[in-house]
Amino acid sequence: MEQKILDIHDLKREFVMGDQTVRALKGITFDIKAGEFVTIMGSSGSGKTTLLNILGCLDKPTEGSYLLDGVDVKSLNRDELAGLRNTKIGFVFQAYNLLPRTSALENVELPLFYNKTITAEERRERAIKSLESVKLAERFDHTPSQLSGGQQQRVAIARALVNHPVMILADEATGNLDTRTSYEIMALMQELNAEGKTIVFVTHEPDIAAFSTRTIMLRDGKIQKDSINQNQRSAKEALANLPESDDY
Amino acid sequence: MSIINLLKIAFRALKRNKLRAFLTMLGIIIGVAAVIAMMAIGEGSKQSIRSSLSGMGSNMITIMPQSNEPGGVRLQGSSIQTLKLEDIIAIQKLQSKNINGLSPVVSASGQAIKGGYNWPTTITGVSPDYLNIRQLKLQDGILFSENDVKSFAKVCLLGKTVIDNLFPDGSNPIGQIIRFKNIPFQVIGILEPKGQSNFGQDQDDIILAPFTTVQKRITATNYLQSIYASATTEASSAAATTEISDAIRESHRLTVAETDDFQVRTQAELISTISSTSSMLTVLLTAIAGISLFIGGIGIMNIMYVSVTERTREIGLRMSIGARGQDVLMQFLIEAILISITGGIIGVILGVSSAYLISYFLNWPILIAESSIIISFVVCAITGVFFGYYPAKKASNLDPIDALRYE
């Protein structure tokens, strides 16, 4: 049996706003196994962001259990959560969130600075390897302003990979990119997935979801549909099929 | 999270904003430089006052007559005739280890005449010890002896001002005869010039002669205007003072109920009085400079606050990739300390060099105390921690979710 990376059971999250209680998640149960490429979809207000925050260990559920790689997140304090984020999760954000005026290499090195066990040489080595895996090795000394949006997102992906996380958590990672670049990023994601990386991709674009192996649809704080993608699209082929000289 | 990593992170963060880091530093730089330069100038002037005062004889003890009559007309010290040669003998009898020189002082003003030249000056009758007590030196010739004192010899030593006025042709005064109030004196020695005293007195406008001669030939009195003594060391001057006043009280046969009919003053007292004035000046200058250092600290706090707000997303990102609140706190704190310490180092260099420039161009005496450098440096580091802590605390308390989505 495959190892469960994520195990979520009856997850609830409520926010108290004044005298009103907003129930953002109303009992969600699912699990993700190693090597899966899952997209979480849903319109705004569906609880997508709340779920993402909990999955990313930035927030804790009000009720229900969340096991990440066998660790019960609910029992951890603020610092332990930070440690968990550092070693188990690789974040990729919509707005890349790279440090400005800082070279790609230093940006990628960043997570390892918060890991005591890693030496300076190891940090550098791993950062270079990580940049190689997103095909940006030759641009390691470029600052974000010298890189295109797609390249910046690839640096961000390299940063997410550098701490060898059990899961890459992408939040609308293609939201700021044009179609071609989005496909390039998805092709990279598929490649990483093929190498065995578990990817959880939050998006609201159905054509992006088509590249994954499984789609979870959220609606109104509940899972509306959780389906295996029978015919996963290949991002590489989609890229090849794009018109050569399109001007968008 | 190791301290080296934290330092690297903070250093990289500062490197990204070089100009701002420098501008923030500027307040500290100016503050520290001002503190060091002000203290150097203050200490320097204190030191120069001190050294010129001890040039007058730092162990010098002055005994002056004073009236001890509670009522009646109070007379000026010099017209009180209580100090006598017997007092000197009484002090000499002590054979105290604390006293190594003793000289009576009898002076008279008048016209000194040599050939066609004359000069209004003062003749001071002293014993040979006087030169040591006042730290006067002979440039040429010889000093009068105890025998000269006993035999009322009409010999004298001249200061430079007197020589310049009586011998304007530059001839050698030694061996020549000058007249003071019609009494002929043979010049046997020339005193080394001392220049002006701290109070603007010309210390070279002086004729020294045996006090017996002055008493007998010129003033025709048998009392002393004052007695000068010198303590063995500056430290023993207090003990010497007590011994002297006890001896004089005894020789004056004062009862316990009677107050002193003389006063004993030490140069050490004068030095401490004057240097306390200049200490006050130093404190004042340093306080002003300290205020600018404080303002520099507020500058750091201000910039760190702006920086925390501006870098909210960065903080959110750092937290999302595993920075604990403590790591963020330390990062901002170290940034603040780095700014203040770097500013401190530049400030020290600037302060020291401007102190030297001041002493070079304005000829002011300076003295750079190591303590002033250490103090301002420590103050700098404390400033960094103190003013950096609050913004850093604010940064570390941010919620990563809010921080990541901060616009």
Image (cartoon, coloured by chain):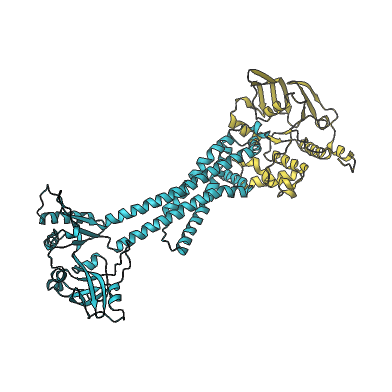
Chain colours: A yellow, B cyan
Image check: B304 left or right of A230?
left
Image check: A127 left or right of B353?
right
- Which quadrant holds residue A130? top right
Q: Is residue A115 visible?
A: no
Position in image of residue B155 (x %, y %):
19, 75
- In the picture, the quarter occupied by the N terminus of chain B is top right
Image check: A58 left or right of B225?
right
Q: Is residue B105 visible?
A: yes
Nearest the eye: A22 or B188: B188
Position in image of residue B102 (x %, y %):
18, 63
Nearest the eye: B277 or B181: B181
User: What is the total number of numbered labels drawn onto the structure image?
Assistant: 0
Instruction: Name the residue: 60% across, 44% down.
Output: B9
Instruction: Name the residue: 53% across, 42% down.
Output: B298
Q: Is residue B290 above or below residue B226?
A: above
- In the picture, the quarter occupied by the C terminus of chain B is top right
Q: Is residue B128 above or below residue B320?
A: below
Position in image of residue B37 (x %, y %):
46, 55
Nearest the eye: A137 or B346: B346
Position in image of residue A19 (x %, y %):
63, 17
Image check: A118 left or right of B168?
right
Nearest the eye: A247 or A12: A247
